[in-house]
Image (tube, rainbow, N blue to C red):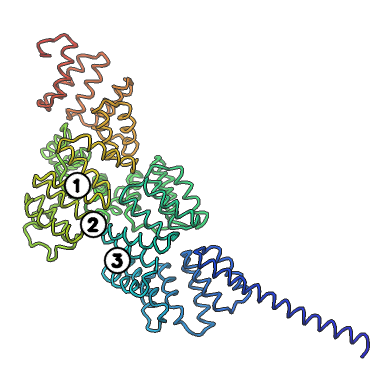
Amino acid sequence: MSRARFLLLAAIVAALLSAAALWQWHRGAADAALSRGIAALAKGDARTARVELMNAVRAHPNSIPARIAQARALLDLRDGEAARIQIERARQLSGSAAATRHLMAEALLLQGDPDGALQEAGMGDVPASSRAIAARVVGQAWLAKGDLPSAAAALDRALKLDASDAQAWVALSRLRMAAGDQAGAILAADRALQIAPGSVRALTARGELVRDQYGLTAALPWFERALERDPHDVPALEQYGATLADSGEARRMLGVSRRLLAIDPGNARAWFMQAVMAARAGRADLARTLLARTGGRLDAEPATMLLRGVLLIEGGKAAQAAQTLAPLAASQPDNDVARTLLGRALFEAGDHVAAANALAPMVAQRDADPYVLTLAARVQEAMGQSAMAQDMLARAAWPARPAAVPFASPQDAAIAAGPAPADARFAQDNIPYIRALLNSGKAGLAVERARLLSRANPGAPAAWLVLGDSLDAAGRMREAVRAYEAGAKIGNSREAALRLAAAWRKLGDPGQSARIVSALLAQNPNDVDAMRLSAAQAMQRSDWRGALRLLRGVQARIGSNDALLMADLARAALETGDLPAARSYAAHAYRLLPGSPVAADAYGWVLLANGERQPAIDLLEKAVALAPAHPVLRAHLAQAYAAKGAKLAAR
């Protein structure tokens, strides 16, 4: 063999050995990446797992284990489309779909296809090792479709197959939330956290429950704990941002929304959060632009419908606003904000009959809001019903509002006269029936039915609240307080807190009432009713600066068209020594509602402080003429007479 041929042969052998070594090195690197990815998945670190498994798939595109593991990581990251692609490729390589049924079902569910998920998970070839997960996905799919009984049956089956599946417990918690069983939802979420203390899904669900149970501020640490585990988790960021927004933490919420958009550039909830913030800042054009970026993906949600309705009204498109708000008012008949906006939109669109019908259930309430009554009066005036309009204006102008009653409905009389719901256990059927009984004066029957409902649903706050309402109507106030407290322990909602505060006032314990309102406001700093109640309590104890701060917060949220709010602002500004602001507030209150004794008294009292005695006396006399039995109004007039030197009149 010649030297040249020998050298060529040696070079070929060396190249082959190098190629084999390189192939072996790549194979080893791919296997190591796969092992690291699976280990990261086991630790719950889906983001690290995705990177490692991506490297494993690139090195060995035909590796079925790598593609299935990558699909699992993508499902944990809630990327259903990318997971579906990996699953389809694994099926092509293996020639079988059975082993990946549960994974494909979850991917389809994440893509918004619950029917496809049900079909995939329901196939008869699902392996025994995957049946628990498949059953859990079936339960989640039925929940997405709104079929709670089917969801409950599927999740019960999933937990019988594998009681250690934390995700199944989270799904059960969400099912119970949807059913109104808050106590049961808490138990399920706590069980998930016992199994997987660092589960981002369980921590997020627990945060949502704490938000309902204790308030916005108490919920924030739970979302922060979830984000410590995974700073890029989209659902946790969405809930955290929404809670910050409702807490009035606009700057922090903006930061969260930007984080969301950095992770998920098309995230609709991030754009919606920013739209809400822009609307609250009075930047309607910017809010419309930001809302448009949601791409219509949130259009069916109540909050989106409400915001869109407000922006359409402010943009002069009342008819479109009415079309947007009508479905919301129909699906949520107790949503007085939506109903008020619908009435305003219909009125501005010229459909006066429809506006009157929209506002009628609210006007029928004894404690109807002065703004609603004034709006309804304008509607009646436009219809030529001047006598009815004057009656509504007189109610709006009255210095004190009667006690609240359950939401009234035009159908109450017919419902109360009809048969009771066949099953006393279901809140959806029984609460409207109990309210109809209350509004028809049948408090005794309402108490009996409400007791049955609360016994059947001890973990549902709504059942305890309607029992409290029934006992209140029956004059059994102390029992009502116990029912409200039972509901508040499960879900300390604003409805429970406001009822408890009112109940303690009726029982003659304003201190306890004030503590409840203070706690509500601490957890819900932007709640308008809590701010107004707290401001009233501050005025009663002569904390005028505190009252003024709270009242200005209310003004920032609802605007300056509430005459009674303007009158309160005038009094608080006057007591803090800001006479020009007091005069401005009082004059505006009087312009809004000149037939109100409160507005006339506030304006007269401010003018008296400014040394304008005769105009003050004229207004204060008008206030007393409108409400002759009101002691504060009479005292103000007496002081005005005394300031003028009219001792006999003052006496």
Q: Look at the numbered discs 2 and 3 and tell me whether their residues touch, using CB distance below 8 Å.
A: no
Q: Residue 522 vs residue 52: left or right? A: left
Q: Amino acid at mark 2?
A: Ala
Q: Amino acid at mark 3?
A: Gly
> Most extreme residue toward the right, as rendered?
2
Q: Residue 282 vs residue 149: left or right? A: right
Q: Amino acid at mark 1?
A: Leu
- Mark 1 to mark 2: distance in Å? 30 Å
Residue drawn at 21 percent across, 28 percent down = 599
Going from N to C along the chain, the mark reached first, 1 or 2, is 1
Image x and y of residue 373, in percent: 18, 40
Residue 27 sits in quarter: bottom right
Going from N to C along the chain, the mark reached first, 2 or 3, is 3
Q: Secondary structure at mark 2?
A: loop
Going from N to C along the chain, the mark reached first, 1 or 3, is 3
**Would you call the spot at circle 3 few (<14 residues within 10 Å), some (14-19), or many (20 or more)?**
few
Work out whether residue 297 or residue 247 is closer to the camera in this orientation and state it: 247
**Would you call the spot at circle 1 few (<14 residues within 10 Å), some (14-19), or many (20 or more)?**
many
- Mark 2 to mark 3: distance in Å? 19 Å
Q: Which mark is residue 146?
A: 3
Residue drawn at 18 percent across, 15 percent down = 640
Work out whether residue 118 or residue 493 is closer to the camera in this orientation and state it: 493
Q: Secondary structure at mark 3?
A: loop
Kindly identify which residue carries mark 2.
460
Q: Which mark is residue 406?
A: none
Kindly identify which residue carries mark 1.
359
Residue 198 sits in quarter: bottom left
Relative to 596, is 646 above or below?
above
